[in-house]
Structure formats: C-alpha cells, structure tokens
C-alpha cells in the first residue's frame, strides 16, 4: 500500500476555486482505483497551504492511475481548470507507507 501526500501552495484569494478542484479530484481518484482521504484546507495559520492524501494498493496501481489520468477527459478537464483559475501556485508530492496497529 502506498499513500500519496500532496502539499499545495495555493492562491489564498482563490479558495473556492481550489475547493472545486479538490472535489473533482476526490471523485476522479476514487473512480480510477484509489481511495481519496480528502483535501485539507487552510483554517488557522498559513493561508496559502493545503494538503491532500490518497492511497493505492501499490506503486504500480498508482502509476496505472497516473497513466490513465493523462488521457481521461474528466482528468484533463480538472488539470485545465487549475491552469485557467490559477488556484495552484505549486505543489509537492511525497510517497509514504502507512503503519497500522
């Protein structure tokens, strides 16, 4: 199992747009075989930082998702939405393995 942790630097004046972007990707990740654990938006503290977590059964499954997302019409639309709105300034991706009791 692999969990992907995304850290976003977002435009704090475009929280509504980033929220819409996140809602799209939650559904898309789940449709394409992953389990999305949600987006975590600024509340207290930094106003330009958001996070997302989602899990796939393996790194190979994640890579299959990445490949599929490059040709899926809804994914391409979500990528374009982020570009058009400018809600994301940059992002970082980390791969982590969860530990359970």
Image (spheres, rainbow, N blue to C red):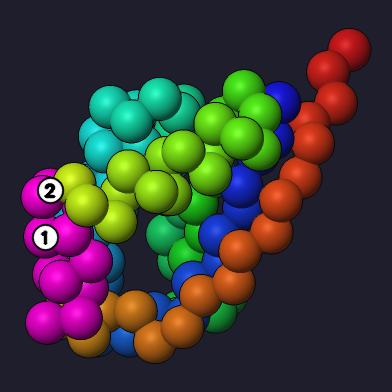
| Residue contact between numbered discs 2 and 1, judged by CB atoms under 8 Å | yes
What residue is shown at x 22% (from left), y 52% (from top)? 71
Callout 2 crowding tier (Cα within 10 Å): few <14, some 14–19, many ≥20 = some
Task: Please tell me whether residue 64 is drawn above or below residue 78 in the rendered image.
Answer: above
User: Can residue 21 be seen here?
Assistant: yes
Q: Nearer the viewer, residue 57 or 51?
A: 57
User: Can residue 16 be seen here?
Assistant: no
Residue 77 lies in the magenta-colored region: yes
Image position, residue 60 (x, y; %)? 61, 35
Q: Which residue is mark 2?
A: 74
Q: Nearer the viewer, residue 43 or 82?
A: 82
What residue is shown at x 66% (from left), y 29% (from top)? 58
Query: Would residue 81 appear left or right of 11 to someone viewing this image?
Result: left
Callout 1 crowding tier (Cα within 10 Å): few <14, some 14–19, many ≥20 = few
Check disc 2 and report its element: helix, strand or loop.
Answer: helix
Point out the stretch of residues depicted in magenta: 73-84
Task: Identify the image quadrant of residue 21.
Answer: bottom left
Query: Would residue 25 appear left or right of 50 to someone viewing this image?
Result: left
Quadrant where the image shows the N terminus: top right
What residue is shown at x 25% (from left), y 34% (from top)? 27
Query: Would residue 20 appear left or right of 67 to someone viewing this image?
Result: left
Q: Which residue is mark 1?
A: 77
């Amino acid at each position: 199992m692999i969990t992907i942790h995304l850290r976003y630097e977002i435009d704090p004046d475009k929280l509504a747009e980033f929220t819409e972007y996140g809602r799209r990707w939650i559904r898309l990740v789940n449709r394409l075989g992953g389990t999305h654990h949600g987006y975590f938006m600024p509340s207290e503290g930094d106003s330009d930082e958001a996070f997302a977590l989602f899990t796939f059964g393996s790194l190979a499954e994640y890579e299959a998702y990445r490949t599929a997302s490059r040709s899926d019409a809804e994914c391409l639309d979500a990528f374009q939405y982020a570009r058009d709105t400018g809600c994301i300034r940059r992002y970082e991706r980390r791969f982590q393995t969860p530990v359970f009791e």
